[in-house]
């Protein structure tokens, strides 16, 4: 019985993959993935996911450091708020971003009035949506890595006269290298898959906000073959990421 | 946090990152038979009322309504979704289920709808007429190509002779016509092209309607049909009868024009 349930579990996970693989027109995949729509979406997805991963790393590292190394009142609350976008339905994330950065949003209305800048419908909005949902992953991965480091190494360096900045640069970051790479890859992969917040907040325009998942969604209603080819590509990328990280996080 | 649950969270989130789909279905108590109707997004309010009236007139019958873009609904039916009745915003998508399967029977036009320009009430870009959509910097939102409202909007812009300039102003192609309304409602789009019927009571305080002159406007004709092999074929026929009879007043109340 136990084994049967486990087998059902595997089937639930695997069957959709088999389904997509079966529907993917393999002989035409290259052609479908080099169509103008697909290439634009690929290019944009790469740019958006990379920008989101960089933002997640740069802002996530100091935060992870503070969460891992210091204790202060309300830390649990801070961490909960930071992790929230991970479990928030993506469309809600989009609505939330609109409420802040939309033309009538808290920050958006101010930007519009002062600088005449509108964020919605821009590539920047797509990056913001992707960063919003990938940031927590980066923070959690970095925090887990920082906790695994021996803090005494930092202390030892400090007693030898190293400044905090020097310790960070020459001791902590090199030791944390693999975790930093994992955090970036995880954030990048999550950003690559972002759909709900993007279509709600950034809209859907080829070359500007139409990332791969949005292109899949649009093509599914016109060119089903292209949609399946792009879906297969996204699955392959996600699968590669999991395989690449397996050694790091499954032990 | 230990590494193990962390991995679990990551895998779950990465693999579930894509979402989206059609608007939800409505369910009743425990009716003896259930009719599934897929209807164009622009019919959301009218068919919700008609579905309720049909349930009232037919005790023991439940109606499940599935709203979305006509092209998406047609794809679902072609892929085998168990749908009894399909009400499309364009004949193209009834043709599609006829051509790619499972087929449509008793196809009848039941309503028409005119396009309109929707702008936020504060009208940030000062849109007073169709030609204003061609002005530089106007943030225009359309339904995507393939969606009836999107195709008709492009046809209308061509009729008005401003297709190139207006299409260059498009900032988003929405999955269905309700998506267009949403972007105008939030105030982020300067204008959207949707149907006259999309300015419902719920949104009339936030959205103003700019009429499109009859000589450039395009009228959508809505066909309805029973999906071949429907589980509830009798009920499906009765539902279509109902739409063509009592339903006509409901449709008119929601701003639809009668079929020719």
Image (cartoon, coloured by chain):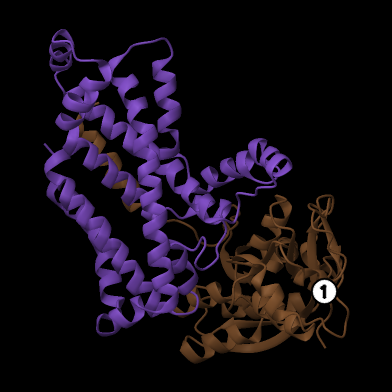
For the point 36% across and 51% down, which residue is it?
A: A50
The one of A138 and B38 positioned closer to us in this rendering: A138
| Left or right of A66, for residue A221 | right
Chain that is purple in the image: A
- Count of numbered tags: 1
For the point 31% across and 77% down, which residue is it?
A: A23
- Quadrant assignment, res B200: bottom right
For the point 43% across and 70% down, which residue is it?
A: A40
Note whether residue B239 is visible.
no
Name the chain under label 1: B
Under circle 1, the secondary element is helix
| Left or right of B26, for residue A134 | left
* Above/below status of A92 relative to B244: above
The one of B225 and A216 positioned closer to us in this rendering: A216
Chain that is brown in the image: B
Note whether residue A114 is visible.
yes
Point out the image quarter for the C terminus of chain A. Answer: top left
Q: Position of residue A44 (x, y in %)?
A: 43, 62
């Amino acid at each position: 019985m136990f084994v049967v349930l486990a087998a059902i579990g595997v089937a639930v996970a695997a069957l959709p993959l088999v389904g997509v693989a079966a529907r993917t027109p393999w002989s035409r995949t290259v052609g479908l993935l080099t169509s103008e729509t697909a290439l634009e979406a690929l290019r944009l997805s790469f740019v958006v996911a990379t920008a989101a991963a960089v933002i997640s790393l740069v802002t996530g590292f100091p935060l992870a450091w503070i969460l891992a190394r210091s204790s202060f009142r309300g830390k649990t609350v801070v961490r909960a708020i930071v992790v929230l976008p991970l479990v928030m339905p993506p469309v809600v994330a989009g609505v939330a971003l609109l409420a802040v950065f939309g033309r009538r949003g808290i920050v958006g209305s101010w930007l519009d009035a002062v600088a005449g800048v509108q964020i919605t419908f821009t590539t920047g909005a797509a990056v913001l949506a992707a960063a919003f949902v990938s940031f927590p992953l980066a923070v959690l991965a970095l925090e887990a890595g920082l906790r695994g480091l021996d803090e005494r190494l930092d202390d030892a360096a400090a007693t030898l006269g190293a400044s905090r900045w020097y310790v960070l640069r020459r001791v902590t970051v090199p030791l944390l290298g693999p975790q930093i790479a994992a955090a970036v890859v995880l954030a990048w992969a999550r950003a690559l898959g972002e759909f709900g917040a993007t279509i709600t907040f950034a809209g859907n325009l080829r070359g500007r906000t139409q990332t791969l998942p949005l292109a899949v969604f649009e093509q599914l209603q016109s060119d089903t073959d292209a949609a399946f080819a792009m879906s297969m590509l996204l699955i392959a990328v996600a699968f590669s990421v999991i395989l690449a990280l397996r050694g790091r996080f499954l032990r | 946090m230990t590494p193990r649950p962390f991995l679990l969270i990551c895998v779950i989130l990465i693999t579930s990152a894509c979402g989206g789909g059609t608007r939800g279905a409505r369910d009743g108590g425990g009716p003896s038979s259930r009719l599934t109707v897929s209807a164009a997004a622009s019919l959301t309010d009218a068919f919700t009322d008609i579905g309720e009236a049909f349930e009232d007139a037919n005790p023991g019958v439940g109606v499940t309504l599935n709203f979305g873009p006509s092209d998406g609904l047609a794809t679902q039916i072609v892929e085998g979704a168990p749908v009894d009745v399909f009400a499309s915003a364009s004949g193209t998508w009834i043709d599609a289920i006829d051509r790619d399967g499972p087929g449509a029977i008793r196809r009848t036009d039941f309503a028409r709808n005119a396009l309109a320009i929707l702008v936020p009430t504060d009208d940030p870009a000062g849109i007073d007429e169709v030609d204003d959509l061609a002005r530089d910097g106007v943030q225009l939102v359309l339904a995507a190509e393939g969606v009836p409202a999107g195709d008709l909007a492009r046809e209308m812009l061509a009729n008005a002779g401003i297709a190139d300039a207006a299409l260059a102003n498009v900032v988003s192609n929405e999955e269905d016509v309700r998506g267009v309304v949403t972007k105008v409602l939030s105030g982020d789009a300067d204008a959207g092209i949707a149907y006259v019927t999309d300015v419902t009571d719920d949104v009339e305080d936030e959205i103003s309607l700019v009429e499109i002159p009859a000589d450039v406007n395009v009228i959508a004709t809505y066909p309805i049909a029973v999906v071949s092999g429907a589980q509830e074929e009798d009920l499906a026929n009765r539902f279509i009868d109902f739409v063509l009879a009592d339903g006509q007043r409901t449709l008119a109340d929601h701003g639809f024009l009668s079929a020719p």
